[in-house]
Amino acid sequence: MANLLRLPGSRLVTHALFIFVIWLAVMRLNNAVDPLFNYYISLVAMFATAMFGMVILVGLSGQVSLGNGALMAVGGYVFAVTSLNWQTVPILGLPWNGLWSMGFAAVGGIVVGLLVGGIAARLRGPYLAGLTLGLAVGVPAIANRFPELLGGESGLMITVPYPDGGYAAPTESFVDAPIDTGAADALSAVPSPEASVAPEDMLTMDNFPSADASVAPEDMLTMDNFPSADASVMPSADSVASTVDATDVAGLGSMLDDTFIIERWQAGLAITVACLVAFIALNLVRGRQGRVWRAVRDDSVAAAVAGISPAKAKISAFAVSSLFAALAGAVFAQILEYVGPGAFGLGLSLSLLVGVVLGGRSSLLGAIIGGLLLVWLPEFVLSLSERGGWDDQITNNAPNLIYGLLVVLVVLLAPGGIVGSLQKGFARLTRRAPKAV
């Protein structure tokens, strides 16, 4: 077994199997819970996706970032703009769908990460924090300068894909639907008001039927010949279903399928993206690139003497972190079905940093724990406010206060976060030194 693990590519296979088992387990859980918990699962997976990049940027490369929420905004806006305005893939001419929007969001994140990383590689300490803080404040505000494209302060409403695929709104699908020529021919047979009518066919006082006109008894409507309730005057369910199938346009039937739960679909998307990002991050962290980032973090001068370029290492960390943040932003846009400056404000960037510090800034597991805390804590505060009858202003600001207190306690008492503290406790129980991160 040990020899098999030493084969080239064996680590990729091991990591792939590990992530695949986790994906199966979480997807099974996702299919077993109600829509509310589907929503919570999607948020945890989305936060974990973004914080995987924070672990690489802050924990492994040793840089400070207060602007990853702005990098999420890049992914969210690229996803929204491309899905709302493009029907075919540029150059290739293929039909557009959500996967292409996710791909373009990833490319946008890499480009922005390289640009910001090139500047950040020259800065450190408070200057780097100031740069990323300005990024968190300035990037979402760009939407106000281009309201026609980015929606301005009100943002953009988007529609998520349904099982039949596509991101177009139902109204647009009806507009693009083919017209039934049979119905058009039937409408053309109706005479217009200007159509000529023969005088003998016109209804006048001369040819108006009198009350004495003879009517056959069998033609008269009486209680004897009134249709009973048992008469088959209503169409059967089969005929209605066949009519709906014949007149269904743009997959409306599948869009209205009772078995389709949009929260479950969103959670499945967020889980899948988080697992793919975790697979990439796991291989980077445990591979050569992870050792390069740690060397630059521990001593950039010694790393440079060993032939490692600190600038390239920092830029690559920013690019990877921005890629993960952009993918998380695209998922966040599909969860909210909306993108706007308010969704990607400074509070989001600070929340990501808090989650990484609490969970463990050097551990991918810490990113998942941080995502759980970011989703659970506001709900916990809301339940406390309902029991205690707190004011709305106190309820809205209490999570931020608790975040700050927890960060201070973690920095003072457990610098490694929850995962670091657990590792130290386990090492003491087993009387072994904890692994270096």
Image (tube, rainbow, N blue to C red):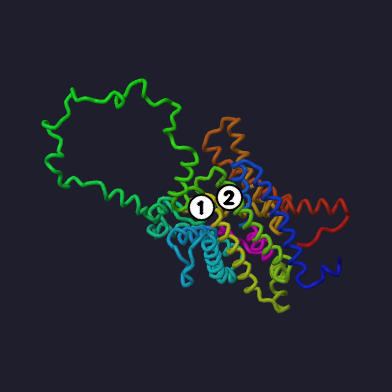
Q: Residues within 10 Å of mark 2 (few under 14, many from 20)?
A: many
- Element at label 2: helix
The percent position of residue 354, horizontal first and vertical second, equals 63, 52
| Closest to the observer, 245 or 110 | 245
- Which residue bears the numbered disc 2? 265
**Residue 260 location, x and y as percent?**
56, 46
Q: Position of residue 224 (x, y in %)?
A: 37, 21
Q: In this figure, which residue is indicated by the disc labeled 1?
A: 160
Residue at 56% across / 70% down in the picture? 114
Q: Which amino acid does label 2 sit on?
A: Trp
**Badge 2 vs badge 1, beta-carbon distance below 8 Å:** yes
Q: Could you tell me which quadrant the N terminus lies in? A: bottom right
- The reply to whether residue 336 is in sight is yes
Q: Position of residue 168 (x, y in %)?
A: 45, 55
> Foreground residue, 19 or 381?
19
Please name the predominant secondary structure of the magenta segment in the image.
helix
**Residue 58 part of the magenta-drawn span:** yes
Whether residue 59 sits left or right of residue 161 in the image: it is right
Answer whether residue 134 is visible to the viewer in this image. no
375 vs 427, nearest the viewer: 375
